[in-house]
Image (cartoon, rainbow, N blue to C red):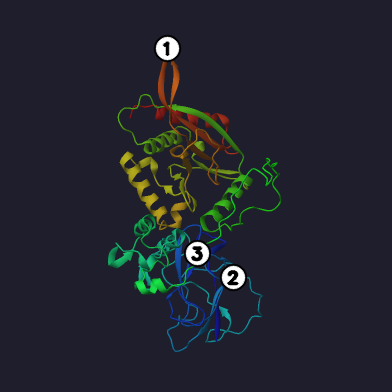
């Protein structure tokens, strides 16, 4: 009796997921709830457990392949002598629409129907805003979280060679990054066992040296620059995981929002002592939201409704090699500077090791992009619906400022405010920006 297992929705209605690593191969026998595959979504890297006990007949793809939600992930030959899940038992994780050809309805039978859908994902994964519980599992004798294994592959690190520092011999994210930096765990870098074996090894032919590029022709004359052709010089790369979802979100935002941007400079000349810039930005946004609630809101363009929020949850843009994450700083209006710093540190750590719950990546009421930590003065940040505003903070500079009786050099921060002009007026946006600048100008 065979059973097909369709890729379930791994959270937030995501349309697909990317295979990171199979824990089995075709022909292996797997038991109910054992880890089947590690999958990467726009939110996290999670282990998908097996819904049945039996022989693996077919796997849908290889590492790096994208699987659409609701299509076949694996097929099993169910072993009735091994533990199975009770018929109809549901653990709360559901598939998207099936892509198989519909079959005629059959009368219910006590046994599971052949060539059917496994129905649900088992184990600790849950739908929606619930936290995805992950435990480090031992694969190939190495205990590590799925996200750590994915990072090791990305950095070219043989995780079996990494010295673990975590509890119970678990390899951590820091262990992998340390091994990548010092080169101590390169794949296939096993030391030679004997000098004689080294001497007996065949000498490889030297690799051909690629021809160097030149602006001169073979006759020594300058070559005319050719316009770019239709052929790409590099290899097309399929967007996956976070970048794939980011592309969808940006396209939707571009199609749905009517953006307008106001820019100005916050004068920080009165600041006394060392200041936490991000904490001050958060405090200033909270003050501006209280002064002009119209920008701390959600807008439904389809129904032309606006929701003003009494609380302030700020989406903090976090740039990573995998793409952009925007975790929510909840109840920012109730946090002091220490609380803001602790919360941001926690969110960044969860983003870094991909353990952040999906519910923390949505539901914010206004956004902040502190891009000036890297470079840039002014910008037109993207407003992601249903929010109506995003604040962008540029790179600090020392500017010559005219004052009564002469000139002075002041430290200033460029501020960009992009807002959905359907949801609020230019006057509301200008008053919001003024309130934000006034708070940033305070000494402390």
Which quadrant of the figure has residue 399? Answer: top left
- What distance separates the C-alpha of mark 3 from that of mark 1? 62 Å
Dot 2 or dot 3, earlier in sequence: 3
Tell me what residue is drawn at x 30 percent, y 29 percent. 273
Residue labelled with disc 3: 10
Residue 328 or 274: which is nearer the viewer? 274
- Answer yes or no: is residue 241 visible: yes
Instruction: Residue 429: give its label.
Output: none
Residue extending farthest to the top is 405
Q: Image height check: is 93 above or below 87?
A: above
Which quadrant of the figure has residue 412? Answer: top left
Tell me what residue is drawn at x 51 percent, y 37 percent. 295
Left of 62 or right of it: where is 182?
left
How many tags in the picture?
3
- Answer yes or no: is residue 404 visible: no
Q: Residue 53: image x %, image y %?
A: 46, 82
SS under mark 1: strand
Q: Residues within 10 Å of mark 3 (few under 14, many from 20)?
A: many
Residue 319 or 151: which is nearer the viewer? 151
Left of 415 or right of it: where is 347?
left
- What distance separates the C-alpha of mark 2 from that of mark 1? 71 Å
Q: Residue 292: image x %, image y %?
A: 48, 33
Residue labelled with disc 2: 71
Q: Nearer the viewer, mark 3 or mark 1?
A: 1
Dot 3 or dot 1, earlier in sequence: 3
Left of 156 or right of it: where is 211?
right
SS under mark 2: loop
Residue labelled with disc 1: 406
Tell me what residue is drawn at x 41 percent, y 56 percent. 356
């Amino acid at each position: 009796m065979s059973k097909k297992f369709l890729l379930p929705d791994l959270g937030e209605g995501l349309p697909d997921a990317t295979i990171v690593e199979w824990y089995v191969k075709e022909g292996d026998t797997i038991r109910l709830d054992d880890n089947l595959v590690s999958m990467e979504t726009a939110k996290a890297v999670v282990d998908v457990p097996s819904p049945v006990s039996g022989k693996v007949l077919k796997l849908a793809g290889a590492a790096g392949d994208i699987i659409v939600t609701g299509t076949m992930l694996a097929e099993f030959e169910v072993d009735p002598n091994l533990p199975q899940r009770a018929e109809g038992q549901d653990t709360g994780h559901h598939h998207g629409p099936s892509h198989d050809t519909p079959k005629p309805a059959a009368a219910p039978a006590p046994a599971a129907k052949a060539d059917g859908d496994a129905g649900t994902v088992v184990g600790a994964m849950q739908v929606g805003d619930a936290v995805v519980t992950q435990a480090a599992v031992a694969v190939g004798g190495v205990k590590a979280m799925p996200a750590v294994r994915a990072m090791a592959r990305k950095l070219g690190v043989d995780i079996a060679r990494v010295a673990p520092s975590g509890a119970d011999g678990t390899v951590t994210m820091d262990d992998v990054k340390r091994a990548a930096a010092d080169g101590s765990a390169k794949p296939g870098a096993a030391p030679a066992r004997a000098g004689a074996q080294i001497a007996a090894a065949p000498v490889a032919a030297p690799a051909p040296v690629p021809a160097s590029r030149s602006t001169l022709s073979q006759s020594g004359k300058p070559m005319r620059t050719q316009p770019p052709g239709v052929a790409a010089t590099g290899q097309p790369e399929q967007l996956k995981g976070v970048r794939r979802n980011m592309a969808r979100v940006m396209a939707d935002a571009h199609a749905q929002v009517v953006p307008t941007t106001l820019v100005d400079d916050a004068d920080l000349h009165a600041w006394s002592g060392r200041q936490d810039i991000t904490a001050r930005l958060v405090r200033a946004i909270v003050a501006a939201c209280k002064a002009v609630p119209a920008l701390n809101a959600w807008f439904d363009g389809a129904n032309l409704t606006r929701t003003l929020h009494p609380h302030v949850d700020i989406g903090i843009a976090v740039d990573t090699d995998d793409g952009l994450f925007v975790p929510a700083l909840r109840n920012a209006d109730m946090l002091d500077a220490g609380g803001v710093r602790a919360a941001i540190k926690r969110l960044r750590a969860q983003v870094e090791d991909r353990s952040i719950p999906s519910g923390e990546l949505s539901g914010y009421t206004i956004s902040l992009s502190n891009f000036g930590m890297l470079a840039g003065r002014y910008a037109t940040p993207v407003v992601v619906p249903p929010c109506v505003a995003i604040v962008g903070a540029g790179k600090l500079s020392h500017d010559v400022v005219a004052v009564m009786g002469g000139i002075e050099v002041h430290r200033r921060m460029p501020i960009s405010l992009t807002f959905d002009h359907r949801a609020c007026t230019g006057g509301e946006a200008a008053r919001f920006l003024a309130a934000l600048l006034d708070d940033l100008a305070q000494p402390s």
